[in-house]
Image (cartoon, rainbow, N blue to C red):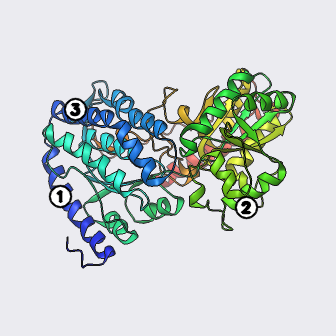
Amino acid sequence: MPEELDRDLLSIQEARNLVKQAQVAQEAFVHFNQYQVDVVCASMAEAAYEQAERLGRMAVEETHMGVAEHKTIKNQFASRDLWMSIKDVRTEGVIRRDEANKIIEIAWPFGVIAGLVPTTNPTSTVIFKSLIAVKARNAIVFAPHPGAPKCSAETARVLAEAAEAAGAPKGLISCMTYVSMEGTQELLKQKAVRLIIATGGEAMVEYAHSVGKPALGVGPGNVPVYVDRSADIEKAARDIVNSVNFDYAVICAHEGAVIADAPIADQLAKAMERNGAYFLTDEQADKLGKAMFRPNGLMQSEFVGRSPQILARQSGFEVPDEARILVARLKEVGPKVPLSREKLAPVVVFYVEDGWHSGCEACMEMLEFGGKGHTMGLHCTEEDIIMQFGLQKPAFRIIVNGSTTMGAIGATTNLPPSLTLATGGMGGGISSDNITVHHLMNVKRVAYEVRPFNPPIVYDRKPVTVPAAPASAPADKQSPSDIENLVRKVVREELSHKG
């Protein structure tokens, strides 16, 4: 493209060109059979795995966020582990036959997908989204974050080159190199783009949802973890510190707040210290909160994914070199307490509550403030308590006795491996799942008649029966006679009206 054009114009034109190429490529790729699709995807996964270390280093060098070794692990997870979880999924032709109900299900792709890439996970996100998109026979065009265009584009190039070497049409995977807000908006608005996968800042995700086409997005994490008196305290402490320290907490599923049961709170704090947690003084916590967050509640970018030592230095104090995470003791949650917000940095806040009922309420308050629908953690061995947290908490991933970072993405649990953790209706999204290949394809259904249609229909005039209250219900709720009579009256009137 001619360099004399302004960057926003270059970006807009590039978006249009890449989408056109992607559309042509996808229209050819849709005719690939399952074996051909899987050969392409396996080649992509292998190439990304081999380049995982180099791409991880590139990401840290460009963004100055996180830890290169940890980004290597994420790249390996997004290639090898993800591919192993989806390699046997049928995404072409007949994928299911329901002989009993006489329904045949056929896979069908969306077409061209737009993928938004965050600066926090710029290479692993491209690997992950490329694999699930192509496995479902889609094309994908990436819009990288302005802070990570080179490593994102290089990752896409590695994947595209591997795909084309395995027989895929050119243009199936691509990434914008002229990055601007105008170009990203143009990409999302292109008619040929049928689906958006949005991973990034809250404003960008909200914009993706507002474009007027299907979008799979994420919300803020701000994950609370409750540590019960019945927990394995040493393991809980180790899991929390390791999880928050991993890649300096740029995965939004890391523990943002520890809610400790009062009888074991001191024991937990000491165990965390033995694992590298540095507990801040009130003065240090206040300095960190004021330096880390803007008045509008957004994090300062220079604090995202930085080491504890850099965080402290930028806030006006020092911490030991051996500090792996910073911990602030707090008593409140809300806008007046900046550190109670989501923190994409190795910082966790520490609350003490007496008993699991109070711990439950504290987790609710944390999630309601910021993190609704995302993830929470629980260290506990009492099954009744675990079930109560599962039933009551407004989070769609509840990780029990493990790291929430690695558990939520499916690395240490049997949840589907994913780097896009949807937050459902309560978090502003349409899905509550770990996004994977199933979400990137539609399903056609060929349905045979099983009940002849012979009008006019004769209504069965049997009254609707209200289910009896369970035996365990309170006595005043066991007799449904009044409700049943009302239902019968309504049904009689409706049927009388119909004829």
Dot 3: within a 10 Å radius of its alpha carbon, few (fewer than 14), some, or many (20 or more) residues? many
Q: Amino acid at mark 2?
A: Lys
Relative to 94, does residue 148 appear above or below in the rendering?
below
The residue that label 3 is drawn on is 38
Which badge, 2 or 1, is on the more N-terminal residue?
1
Check if mark 2's residue and mark 3's residue have beta carbons within 8 Å: no
The residue that label 1 is drawn on is 21
Check if mark 1's residue and mark 3's residue have beta carbons within 8 Å: no
Residue at point 20%, 55% (across, down): 22
Q: Is residue 105 left or right of residue 339?
A: left
Residue at point 61%, 59% (across, down): 299
Q: Position of residue 387 (x, y in %)?
A: 68, 28
Residue at point 34%, 27% (across, down): 84
182 or 242, which is in the foreground? 242
316 or 102, which is in the foreground? 316
The image quadrant of residue 479 is: top right
Dot 2: within a 10 Å radius of its alpha carbon, few (fewer than 14), some, or many (20 or more) residues? some
Judge whether residue 458 can be spotted in this image.
no
Q: Amino acid at mark 1?
A: Gln
Relative to 87, does residue 252 appear above or below in the rendering?
below
Check if mark 2's residue and mark 1's residue have beta carbons within 8 Å: no
Quadrant where the N terminus lies?
Answer: bottom left
Tell me the distance, in whole angstroms, between the alpha carbons under discs 2 and 1.
Answer: 47 Å
Q: Nearer the viewer, mark 2 or mark 3?
A: 2
The residue that label 2 is drawn on is 290
Which badge, 2 or 3, is on the more N-terminal residue?
3
Which badge, 1 or 3, is on the more N-terminal residue?
1
